[in-house]
Image (cartoon, rainbow, N blue to C red):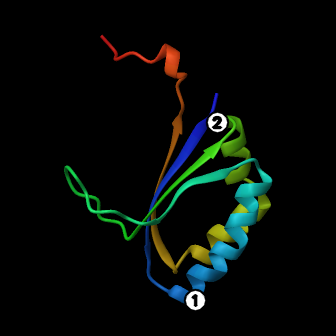
Amino acid sequence: MPAYVIVGVDVLDQEAGLAYAAVAQPSILSHGGRYLVAGPTPAPVEGAWDSDRLLVIEFPDMDRIREWYDSPEYRRARELRKDAARVRMLFAEGSPAEGFSLPT
């Protein structure tokens, strides 16, 4: 079942942010990830969102997300990003459309 990485990012150092992206993007793609949303955060409809950028990345499953996140390539990217950006990240399981129901 697909799983998702949802990220809010505030870039603090543009040059270091670009160095991070140059390492992070290939690591995501090599682990089966694909970007669904990647860009400036749109205006909120309800509530507040306090990040400059929003990313939603789909992976084949949660195991692949964890393999990617713990990979040497992405550990290197995280080191590059350390002082370059403020990041909030969630891992979320997908659900099959035909089986979706609200909890009771």
Image spot of residue 62 (x, y percent): 64, 36
| Image quarter in which the N terminus is found | top right
Q: Give the class, few, some or many, for how many residues have Cα within 10 Å of label 2's Cα (few <14, many ≥20).
A: some
Q: Which residue is mark 2?
A: 62
Left or right of residue 55: residue 60: right
Which residue is located at x 67 percent, y 44 percent?
A: 66
- Amino acid type of disc 1? Glu
Image spot of residue 10 (x, y percent): 41, 73
**Residue 15: which disc?**
1
- Amino acid type of disc 2? Met
Q: Is residue 39 above or below residue 32?
A: below
**Residue 82: which disc?**
none
Left or right of residue 51: residue 20: right
Which residue is located at x 38 percent, y 71 percent?
A: 52
Q: Is residue 37 above or below residue 83?
A: above
Which residue is located at x 78 percent, y 61 percent?
A: 72
Q: Secondary structure at mark 1?
A: helix
